[in-house]
Image: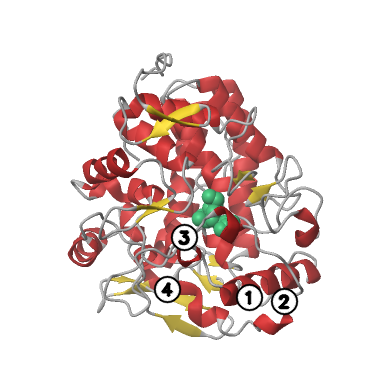
Amino acid sequence: MQASKAAEPVRGARRTGKARVEAPFVSLERACIDLLRANDRGGYTVPSPRLYPHQWAWDSAFAAIGWAHIDLDRAVTELELLMQGQWPDGRIPHIRFHKPSADYFPGPDFWGTRDRSSITQPPVWASAARRLLELGGDGRRIRALLGPIDRSHQFFRIARDPLGYDAVAVVHPWESGLDNSPAWDSAMAAIDPTKAPPFQRVDKKRVGDPSQRPTDDHYKRYVVLVKAIADSDFGPGPLAVYDPMMTAILARAEEDLEWLADQLGHSELERGRGTRLCSGLMSRLYNPALERFSYYDAAAGERLEVDVVGAYLPAMLDLPVSARVLERLRQSYWTEWPLPSTSPEHPEFDPVRYWRGPTWVNVNWLVADRLPGLKERTLELIERSGFCEYFNPLTGEGLGAREFSWTAALALDWLRGCAM
Ligand code: 2M8
């Protein structure tokens, strides 16, 4: 499919800043395009202008998927800039700080780096590159990304699998992308918040209602981990939790990288890594009694049975148990506005606090082709509440940042008839 040329703005829609991006929309598709253009910083897309003014890794890959429907060359540039931030050991930093900004904490000085963070994020960039090629992106430019993408995948095996499980263990909740999920609570309990150096949060000022953001106690622990990683020469630090969702995303990315290598003639790629990750998921993290996946705290040697959406996300893959896991997910997570990020039955479920209950468009996008009705319901939610960062799964209220890029990018991908 060829990306079509962007249409002119539609009259009558409400404006915020330069873009017409607030519900009700005259044209949702038009509003998605306007939002991505408004959040473009000349080659990379900020997740949201006020709360997240830098380049975040998985946000950027999702934005590239949106851009592919507007301007394929611009979409490839997004991934090129993302890969340019790569560390020598292959990791793609979860944040790249292109310009200084007082609007975000922690900045590079806190990370102990010049212009990038020292942890990574869910590796969705191979899957984004695949989408770009499928939509007609420049094969020569995309081929040049395959070596760096390959090295970014190898980083997980070298530095994020301490027990040799053929799975991914995150070293910071921020690395998982689901930062504040109850999945990390028990491992984070071992991190001493009193060790945090003095710091000033900016996020609470940007999102008016602090009940939608992590608590100060959690933030102190995040900061302690950032410092511990810097102090260990950017090695793993004290936390390592095997994460089924991150592992599933990498397994999908490995499949997509193999597909790209076949299409573009990249013969150096080592094959079969995706299959190994699927075996790791099944043998190490699947719990047949619960019909979902577990987390595993490698530092404590403890299996963690937490009922959060990430425990079901491996069902995005063709695993022998996927149908069963999807059925469970539908039974427990089909709220008024699915999917909540934490089961409503979980004692820590909170419908407004970030990653502890709200619905997120990127999570839905990852499984939507396997859960009939989810795509339509999510588009309805965006039509109704706008391009919010996340949404109350019970009421549909929009929460967190407004003008949030991946909400628009992935909605546009759906509207143009694509599925993961
Ligand atoms: C959130 O994470 C950042 C830290 O990386 C933050 O709260 O400051 C998460 O939702 C993460 O998944 C996302 O990539 C980032 C930017 O949208 O915001």
- Where is residue 282, by image quadrant? bottom left
| Label of residue 196 in the image | 2
Whole-number angstrom distance, CA of label 3 to CA of label 1: 24 Å
| Label of residue 247 in the image | 3
Whole-number angstrom distance, CA of label 3 to CA of label 2: 30 Å
Q: Residue at x 62, y 49 (%)?
A: 152
Q: Are the two marked residues, 2 and 4, in contact with CB atoms closer than 8 angstroms?
A: no
Question: Which dot, 4 or 3, sits closer to the camera?
Answer: 3
Three-letter code, disc 3? Thr
Among numbered discs 2 and 4, the one appearing first in the sequence: 2
- Above or below residue 161? Residue 412 is above
Question: Which dot, 3 or 2, sits closer to the camera?
Answer: 2
Three-letter code, disc 2? Ala
Among numbered discs 1 and 4, the one appearing first in the sequence: 1
| Label of residue 284 in the image | 4
The residue at label 3 has a CB less than 8 Å from ligand 1? no
Q: Secondary structure at mark 4?
A: helix
Q: Are the two marked residues, 1 and 2, in contact with CB atoms closer than 8 angstroms?
A: yes
Residue 211's spot in the image, x, y percent? 46, 67
Of residue 347 and residue 209, the one placed in the foreground of this image is 209
Three-letter code, disc 4? Arg
Among numbered discs 3 and 1, the one appearing first in the sequence: 1
- Above or below residue 336? Residue 370 is above
Among numbered discs 4 and 3, the one appearing first in the sequence: 3
Q: Secondary structure at mark 1?
A: helix
Identify the residue under disc 1.
221
The residue at label 4 has a CB less than 8 Å from ligand 1? no
Among numbered discs 3 and 2, the one appearing first in the sequence: 2
